[in-house]
Image (spheres, coloured by chain):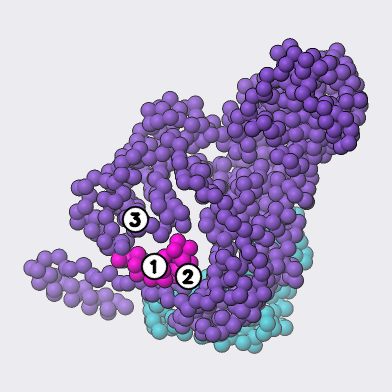
Amino acid sequence: MRDPDLPALELLTRVLGATASAKLPSALVRDWNLALAVQSGLDVRREGSLFWTFIALRDGADTTTVERIVRETMAGVARDGVSAEALDAVRRPMLTSERFALQGVRARAQAITAAEVLLGDATLAGRRLEALERVTPADLQRVAQRVLGGAPHAVVLLDPAPVAGGMNR
Amino acid sequence: MNRILATALLAASLHGPALAAVGAPAPLPVPPPAPVTPEVRTLASGLRVAVVRDTRQPIVQIQLRLPAGTAAEPERHPGVATLTGQLVRMGTSSRSAEQYERELGRHGITLGVTVGRDAAIVAMGMERGALASGFELLADAVRNPVFAPEPFEVSRRVMAQQLGQQLQSPAVLADERAAEAFYSPHPYSRPALGSLDALLQMDPESVRGFHRERWRPDRALLAIAGDVTADEAFRLAEEWFGGWAGRASADRPAPAPAAPQVRVVDVPSAPYSEVRVGVVTPGRGDGRWPSWQLAHATLEGGGLPAGARASLTGHRDAGLLLLAAPARHDSVAAVAARLRAALAGLADPARSGPALAATRRRVAQALPLQLESMGSRLTQWMLDDLSGLGSDGPERLQRALLAADLAPLADALRRPAPVLVVAPAVRVRAALAALGPVEEQALQRTLTSAPADTLPAPDAEQVRLGREAIAAAVAAHGGERALRAVRTLVTEGEIELLAGGQPISGTFTAVRAFPDRFAYVTKLVGLEVRQVLVGDSAWTLTVGDTARLEAVSPEGVETLRTSLVSDPVSLLLAALAPEARPALRDRESMDGEPAVAVDFRSPRGPVRLMLDARTHRLLAADGVFRGERWLERRRFRQPVRQAGLLLPGLEERIAEGQVVSRIRLRRAATQVALDPGLFRRPRVIGGQLLDP
């Protein structure tokens, strides 16, 4: 949560999987027709955060292929980065949405409380949008290399078929 | 933060004895709502443009109000206002739906369309830097939508599914039908989603027509609030909306609401009942509106029976204070009586004490919080404008709330309020009779419902000629013996539903097992609908993504019985019956060929048959005789001989002069052995059809 790369990581999450036209849904749903739905998110905590991607596979889809495409897509972002236009395409709706939300007293109070309680500095609430504005394509690429390449990761498969033992991996 | 809290607690403990010594603290002052003082100009097209500067955030909100709410819909197209609102963003003359959404996303612009009873409001939010793009995209959606067939079908299907979900929830169904019942016959009684019948009869041209009639600038209002100067906003408005032309059509007449005393919406399968009791209030612009808000807050603040809730909605011409509660079937009358008593209790003079004063303050204090966003303030201002209130609406409303009293409502509250119940009618009708005359309504709505008039009595010569003409027609269609031998008749083919242009195509199968079984199966826009009549009962099975089984109301059973005997074989045999007294009254032409018109009395009401004067073939059958006019016609064309009978290869159904459907016969069979499962009520559990 205190990591200076957090704003870039939030935007990277959106680039990868926050909307139907993001990179992972585009690859797995539109291009390869291997998944019904794909979504990525970031679970932000004080000590360490979790970047996750949820994939609902089509019946019969090969999980090894799906994993390979996920890794290649992420590696592509780390290797090639994203254009300024692609970055803005995820940043602008995010900023608009947050600015509209902050019109309300309750939303502002919650933002200030979260900054004070979790970060120890209420004034950080007012600087979050500025930090998102400052993220550059280079920041995004650097964070992708840092987080998507070397960070520990896990793959969980949930098979709804009546297999003894339930989860098979 | 903890330091602050600790300091506050310490201060409170130190001052506690002193506060106790001087009594309860004086109430805090009621903060006024932020004023909305727009600068307003009118463009040459008649479009009014209002601008409110607000620089708290680098964002701008635009709202466009159009006279395109559900109250403005044409009678035959309920649901078209909502459909139009959904479709304006789904393809324009220069952008596909995908391109439009991509452009919105690229600029970080949000867009929403809300269709209410009085108006449709298009709302757009954006960062300051995207304002010019926002104006261009808004103008594109509002002025240039194309209503292409594919998105039309998608939206229509979504609405049909929403209607299906509504039918599966007694609570949602009750809210919707209560508004219909209590506002009726005012146009506010129109259901937002329309009906399945009406949706199936609409096409893209229906939506284009509504858009052409009501999405016009002369009665529209464009409001812009946010980090923008008035000059820049007016310049952009002129640039993108200055050339917008046309005038909205006149409003329909709006008769005053006159609710039935007690109405039951018959849902035989409802596991529990839902009760609604309502009062139609004056509109938002009326001086008593704050008192109604106070009444609503008083009910919500402890004036309701356990498990009940209250809502208040306000529109230009009227509003509705609605009390709602679920009930067991055997408790419906008691629950309705308690809700009525809660309303009447508001008129008790003993209410005007400190509790009411506290409620006044609570409602007045909440107003600024409700109006803290630009969007909510703009919406409030637009609704105030629609109701004829000035721009000081929020401040004035707050003052009025602080001075409001329930006394002006006493007469309205003491009158027995109308009641609507969603329940199996057979379980509740006797108990509800104690509350007033009970009216029953079918779950499925039909577009026509008034009873048919009777025919004038024919003279002997007309009857003689009528019987001769019918005998000739029977002979032309295979002879009386062949017609009477038909015990089962199965027809199938294609069906097209039309409403002004684009047809909706599908298939149909009609299975008639005389005298009292009938199954009519249509497959349209991905939905299979099976209507089945067996004796005195009937059901409808709808199969789409999920399955839904509904019992058919008594009125629906009558409709299916009429359909069972609407084929040429049944019509001719009905005209042969001694009590039919067919009468030849007119000789006229149809499509340039000489024809005779023979009317007769049938068990299902008056019928008129148009017969070819030369071949004696059946050309058309007319029904629904009202005000000396026949409102419905089945036109039989392209005769084919199948299964030994002369049957129409093409049948057009014409309602009030317009072709609403066509069916093309592909196959007919008589005397076939029917699958008994066809007339067995299927089982549907959790949306799954267990007996296909």
In-front residue for pair B391/A114? B391
Of the numbered discs 2 and 3, the one sitting upstream in the chain is 3
Residue A106 located left or right of residue A163: left
- State the hue of chain B: purple
Callout 1 crowding tier (Cα within 10 Å): few <14, some 14–19, many ≥20 = many
Same-chain check, marks 1 and 2: yes
- Pick whichever, B638 or A16, lies toward us: B638
Q: Earlier in the sequence, mark 3 or mark 1?
A: 3
What kind of element bears circle 2? helix
Q: Dot 2, how many residues are within 10 Å of its Cα: few (below 14), some (14-19), or many (20+)? A: many
Q: Which chain is cyan?
A: A
Q: Residue at x 8, y 68 (%)?
A: B21
* Between discs 1 and 2, the one toward the N terminus: 2
Q: Amino acid at mark 1?
A: Gly
Q: Which residue is mark 1?
A: B393
Label 2 resides on the chain identified as B
Q: Label 1's element?
A: helix
Mark 2 lies on residue:
B378
Q: Which residues are magenta?
A: B376-399
- Determine if marks 2 and 3 fall on one subunit: yes
Query: Identity of the amino acid at label 3?
Result: Arg
Q: CA distance from mark 1 to mark 2?
A: 11 Å
Give the chain letter at badge 3. Answer: B
User: Can you tell which mark lies on residue B158?
Assistant: none
Q: On the image, numbered disc 3 is attached to which residue?
A: B288
Name the spot of residue A116 as percent of width and height, x first.
Answer: 38, 79
Gap between marks 3 and 1 measured at Cα: 14 Å
Distance from disc 2 to disc 3, alpha carbons, whole Å, reads 23 Å
Is residue B344 visible in the rendered structure shown here?
Answer: yes
Determine the image quadrant of residue B602: top right
